[in-house]
Image: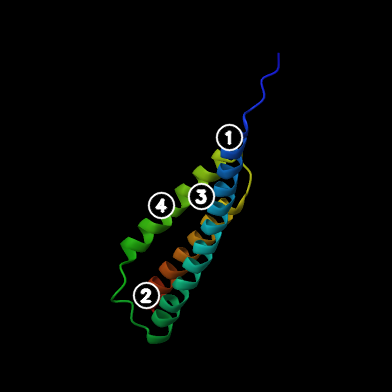
Amino acid sequence: MTLRPTRAASAAVDAHERYVRALGWLFVAFNFARVLTYLPSIWLVHASGDSSQHSAVTWMTWVGANLTMLAWLYEQNGRRIDRSVLATGVNTAMCISMLAVILWVRIA
């Protein structure tokens, strides 16, 4: 005897798959927007030469948090790069960029 899922169960699985797919695309969209929000800060600190409103310790912490999240996601995905790994990698790069500009301005 083969058990077949009911229509309601099948519909629930389909709805969940649509939700997970939509959630994945929302993750990508918001992370793309997040990357764009780093750019004005990076440009402003670079152009003005004033990094006094930015904490290097905070940005180092964000770099560390993003790097560990990147490593965790990579391991959880079977050491494959997917959109979550890629988005976290880009966010990490942006935090590193901001930190580098802050330190450059303070050292120069």
User: Horizontal and vertical percent for residue 31?
Assistant: 50, 62
Looking at the rendered structure, the secondary structure element under dot 2 is: helix
Task: Report which residue position mark 4 lands on.
Answer: 65
User: Horizontal and vertical percent for residue 66?
Assistant: 45, 54
**Is 89 located above or below residue 44 in the figure?**
above
Q: Would you say the residues marked 4 and 3 are in contact, meaning their CB atoms lie under 8 Å apart? A: no
Q: Residue at x 56, y 38 (%)?
A: 12
Task: Report which residue position mark 2 lands on.
Answer: 107
Whole-angstrom CA distance, mark 4 to mark 1, is: 41 Å
Looking at the rendered structure, the secondary structure element under dot 3 is: helix
- Disc with the residue nearer the chain's start (4 vs 1): 1
Whole-angstrom CA distance, mark 2 to mark 4, is: 25 Å
- Disc with the residue nearer the chain's start (3 vs 2): 3
Task: Report which residue position mark 3 lands on.
Answer: 70
Looking at the rendered structure, the secondary structure element under dot 4 is: helix
Task: Report which residue position mark 1 lands on.
Answer: 8
Is 5 or 44 nearer to us in this picture? 5
